[in-house]
Image (spheres, rainbow, N blue to C red):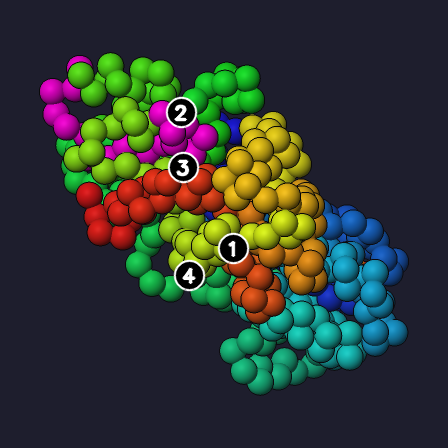
Amino acid sequence: MGLNDTPSAERLHIGFFGRRNTGKSSLLNAVTGQDLAIVSEIKGTTTDPVYKAMELLPLGPVVIIDTPGIDDKGHLGELRIQKTRQVLQKTDVGVLVVDTESGRTAADEELIALFAERNIAYLVAYNKSDLLRNVPEPADDHEIYVSAQTGFNIGALKERIAARGQTSGPEKRILGDLIKPGDIVVLVVPIDSAAPKGRLILPQQQAIRDVLESAAVSVVVRESELKATFDRLAQKPALVVTDSQAFAQVQADTPEDVPLTSFSILFARYKGLLDTALDGVAALDSLQDGDSVLISEGCTHHRQCDDIGTIKLPRWLNAYTGKDLKYTWTAGGTFPDDLSPYKLVIHCGGCMLPTREMQHRQQMANAQKTPITNYGIAIAQMNGILERATKPVKFGV
Ligand SMILES: Nc1nc2c(ncn2[C@@H]2O[C@H](COP(=O)(O)OP(=O)(O)OP(=O)(O)O)[C@@H](O)[C@H]2O)c(=O)[nH]1
Ligand SMILES: [Mg+2]
């Protein structure tokens, strides 16, 4: 991924759902103005979800998702629901496409219930309204009458999707709100055998970008060069941000009066996950012999995270707690519905998962009263520097 690409997790994900043949694929083509999806009069043309990243005005960078139609039997069936849930994990705005002539059915109501369950903003698009003699007034602002065929109301639909997708509140920053123009921020990036060849990982890229936007100065170093860097800088850094894996050395080499935090803490805050993760980490100190810990990763292809999750974390946890713990691992889109077997869930930072999905996993854990924290915060706790590392985000620098 290049620096100029909007990361997938940051794009607005728009999913088209509905019964077979209602015109989901046609509507997707109309909205994007491109022939992306195959359309036919045969029911069940789209067989698997299709994801397409693109720039779409007035929405900006988006991912458009076409989904297979659900059947007309009025009941989604367990497998369909499972498949739909997988797409819903990634969906920010759901467009339920209904054939205007046949209207809404029980299957549509089930889909609406699934949107509601996950707090997903949705619209009901009554398609094929070219076949109606009179287009009725929508019942409420969830509904819109459209025609993929004639283009009727397609512009309005896009605007409504944009309105639904807008997150309220002030724009969130990774660290830009903590620093001033001209500040020096030292970013500590270990380059070990598990680091990706030839590039930086996404959170590092995003942090550098945010420093640039603040007209501040980023100095990017390995932990082995940190000490010498302090000696050379004429201006005291406003903040040091480290990869959690290098905590031990970085905290030793960073003068007490220089604020120190980690990428994982900054991103947990950015995604609204920090408070729960800080509550959850307390469970580390009450683990007993035989307790089970779930270690969850958001993707399946990050060697660096894999190395931390499967090897380093268990080793550190065993040493820190002195207990005989049992470990379970999950990776990628899977996350257990039932968390009751676990005394603690330690999740990766989720840099490749949509924020919505990370929040959903936290909510599941909260609802089941299972403590949940993340890799970086657990590592800070085990290194005895959680208090120091959270100070900059709690009290500023
Ligand atoms: N009259 C009319 N026909 C439409 C409209 N939109 C789609 N169709 C027709 O409806 C049929 C199904 O369209 P698709 O876009 O393949 O429907 P789909 O919901 O993606 O279907 P599956 O992938 O099979 O679930 C095709 O014959 C389209 O030409 C519309 O706005 N008006
Ligand atoms: Mg289709």
Would residue 32 be visible to someone looking at this image? no
**Do labels 3 and 4 touch, CB within 8 Å?**
no
Label 2 and label 4: CA atoms lie apart by 31 Å
Dot 3: what SS? loop
The reply to whether the magenta stretch includes residue 236 is yes
Reading the chain from its start, which is encountered first: label 3 or label 4?
A: 4
Foreground disc of the pair 2, 3: 3
Question: Mark 1 and mark 3 in contact (Cβ < 8 Å)?
Answer: no
The correct choice, above or below, for 93 with respect to 7 in the image is below
Q: Amino acid at mark 1?
A: Ser
Which residue is disc 1 drawn over? 286
Mark 3 crowd level (few <14, some 14–19, many ≥20, 10 Å Cα): some
Nearer mark to the viewer, of 3 and 4: 3
Nearer the N terminus, badge 2 or badge 4? Answer: 4
**Which numbered dot is residue 7?**
none
> Which residue was labeled with disc 2?
189
Where residue 365 sits, quadrant-wise, is bottom right
| Residue 383's disc number | 3
